[in-house]
Image (cartoon, rainbow, N blue to C red):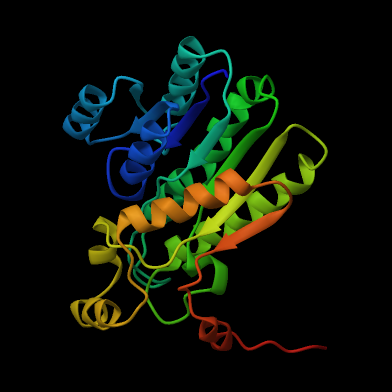
Amino acid sequence: MKQKTIVIVGASRGIGKALLKLYAKSGYTVIGTYNKNVKAAQLLSKKFDQVTFIHCNLAKLHSVRACAKKISRITPSLDIVINNAGIYTAGGLQQLPIRALHNAFGVNVTGKFLLTQLLLPLLNTAPEAKVVFISSRFGFFGNVEADSLSYTLSNSALIMLSRSLQEEFLHTNIRIGCFIPTVTKTDRFTSAFTREEQMAIQQSKLLAQPIDTARKIKAYTDSLRGVSIGVDARVPNELFHKIRLETV
């Protein structure tokens, strides 16, 4: 069988790093992207022979275009793209600089849109290609209490992007997915929650290690066939009750 190739966006740390290890051990040729973690990317490239890293700053469109060109030089075909990278910036309407909002949309939405668009010729050559966007429960339910406006808005947009692309590519060789993980112990965990919130989450059953979340994302991706949004079972249904729904 032909060795499959996967692109993992944001693969030098956290969930992306765990995904890279899982797919590399499963026999995939893995192309990972990084932005600032040069040393981590170098170490992972040395550890796995079939892993290649490419720099990509999702907030800079020229960087995204350069990344896509480099990927096309490495492989003529892509089986999977997992859009994993993301940034969190605290602040509500009164505190958030507009530049921070633009940057959040650039990394969390626009950069992923452009990279996926540029990789379409490679995805079209695969018999059954898959593109999966990793969003957040913030965007899925609406985070109405924390001062996480840019993160919530951009992740909501990412979910809608996924749903729109699912319809656009419904009758093609490309399947589009979106996965909502539970709270995962990454760098973002310490930046998005107060110390009291972190302690409460750690005492609950909501917190997952990166490898646990990566396994769920891989299982969702491997089984992706139709139109779906995957939600980690640990995400509590009570979050729905934070949103008041009225029919008119």
Which residue is outermost to the top?
A: 73
Q: Is residue 231 above or below residue 204?
A: above
Q: Position of residue 75 (x, y in %)?
A: 51, 14
Determine the image quadrant of residue 26.
Answer: top left
Identity of the residue drawn at 21% across and 80% down: 199
Determine the image quadrant of residue 9.
Answer: top left
Q: Position of residue 84 (x, y in %)?
A: 44, 45
Quadrant of image for the C terminus = bottom right
Quadrant of image for the N terminus = top right
Residue toward you, 149 or 24: 24
Identity of the residue drawn at 47% across and 75% down: 143
Residue toward you, 23 or 125: 23
Q: Is residue 80 left or right of residue 234?
A: right
Q: Position of residue 66 (x, y in %)?
A: 44, 19
Identity of the residue drawn at 38% across and 40% down: 22
Determine the image quadrant of residue 42.
Answer: top left
Q: Is residue 99 above or below residue 6?
A: below
Residue toward you, 142 or 197: 197
Identity of the residue drawn at 49% across and 42% down: 83
Q: Is residue 213 above or below residue 4?
A: below
